[in-house]
Amino acid sequence: NTLNSHRLVQFAKEKGKVDEMVEKIMSYYFEQEKDISDLKVLKAAAAEVGLDEKETEEFLESEKHVDTINDQVREAYMLGITGVPAFVINQKELLSGAQETDTWEEVLEDLGYLKSSDS
């Protein structure tokens, strides 16, 4: 379960370290094969990006941001998102999974962000 990982990202956002935290958690999971549901692993990630150890521990022991994350999950399901990666553009278009360049170009043309190559 990645609930605490997502919560920790929100905590890091409050501290101005969101990019660093996302990068660290992704590295832990994809490159180092660490268990990002383990609180010890999350505390180590927080320390590596410069978050205060005591504040991080208190945060992870709390329920802060649980509702925020659950609301985001519900919103994702309402938009039709059931996996990652998923991209919602202007609350209109949903691209789920890896997409070819042609698909991206077509969607962006339909939304008026790119001129059609046919014109």
Image: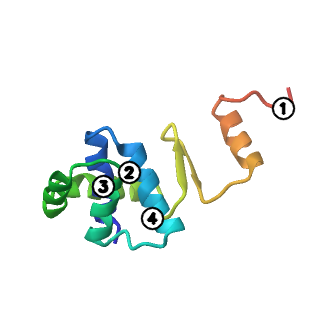
Rendered position, 116 above or below 85: above
Q: CA distance from mark 2 to mark 3?
A: 7 Å
Dot 1 lies on which element? loop
The disc at residue 64 is none
Q: CA distance from mark 2 to mark 1?
A: 39 Å
> Label 4 crowding class (10 Å Cα cut-off): few <14, some 14-19, many 20+?
some
Dot 4 lies on which element? helix
Q: CA distance from mark 4 to mark 1?
A: 41 Å
Identify the residue position indicated by label 4 in the image. Answer: 28
Q: Are marks 2 and 3 in contact (CB under 8 Å)?
A: yes
Q: Between label 2 and label 1, give the one nearer the viewer.
A: 2
Asked whether 49 or 71 is in front, the reply is: 49
Query: Of label 3 and label 1, which has the lower sequence position?
Result: 3
Rendered position, 90 above or below 97: above
Q: Are marks 4 and 1 in contact (CB under 8 Å)?
A: no
Query: Of label 2 and label 4, which has the lower sequence position?
Result: 2
- What residue is drawn where x is 72% and y is 48%? 103
Identify the residue position indicated by label 3 in the image. Answer: 46
